[in-house]
Image (tube, rainbow, N blue to C red):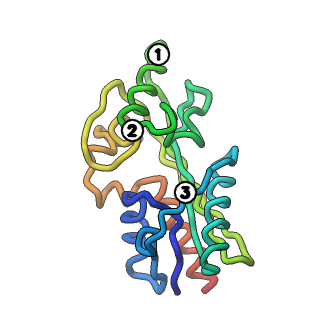
Amino acid sequence: MKIIFASQNQGKVKEIKEIFKSTPFEIVSLRDLGNNINIEESGNTFYENAFIKAKAVFEIYNEPVFSDDSGLVVEQLDGRPGVISARYAGEYCSYNDNNIKVIKELENFAEPHKAKFVSTAVYYDGDQVIESVGELHGIIIKEQRGSNGFGYDPIFIPNGYLKTIGELDFELKNKISHRSISFNKMKELLSKKF
């Protein structure tokens, strides 16, 4: 069964294809389809944004789609960056810009800087909506470490680890990541249905 993954982010695509590689589900990315559609994420929650993307892509291809919206939630920043994690430092900012902004905003707070990564995955086939959520808890550090991964990975140390996600190898990151948790739950839910 083919499922379109509504993402342009090659890091995410690689992660999801790895999770679904030994299943009857063939994951096809928007890039695989030659589509660089830009969908405005206007929701107020991770679920709303994931559903907006899934529905928009379903309306183009009329095939099952899943999407996710994910981000960093920092306790001392009242949940920011949250749903605007990808563009926290500005509309066309880099991952580095975002990391620097979060580190700067935490300067006046006492450590530890508790945070979590949240991923909400949504499957949509025009008829049914299936949702799964994954969270990875940890702390934010004051400097960037590691070049594996993307986004806030270089400033986030998961609970139980001494290294940032940016320092962990891809295989380990795939096992513990918020996206891995949500999409492994999704894989189970879909396997029971189809």
The circle on residue 166 is: none
Could you tell me how far apart the alpha carbons at marks 2 and 1 are, in whole angstroms? Answer: 27 Å
User: Residue 152, image x and y in percent?
Assistant: 40, 40
Distance from Cα at disc 1 to Cα at disc 3 = 39 Å
In the rendered structure, find residue 110 and report the number of the disc placed on it. 1
Earlier sequence position, callout 2 versus callout 1: 2
Residue placed most toward the observer, 110 or 125? 125
Q: Nearer the viewer, residue 31 or 104?
A: 31
- Looking at the image, residue 61 lies above or below residue 37: below
In terms of depth relative to the viewer, which is nearer, 27 or 157?
27
* Residue 167 sits above or below residue 133 on the image: above
Residue 31 visible in rendering: yes
Question: In the figure, 40 relative to 145: above or below?
Answer: below
Residue corresponding to mark 3:
38
Q: Which mark is residue 94?
A: 2
Front tag of 3 and 2: 3
Cα gap from disc 3 to disc 2, whole angstroms: 17 Å
Residue type for callout 3: Asn
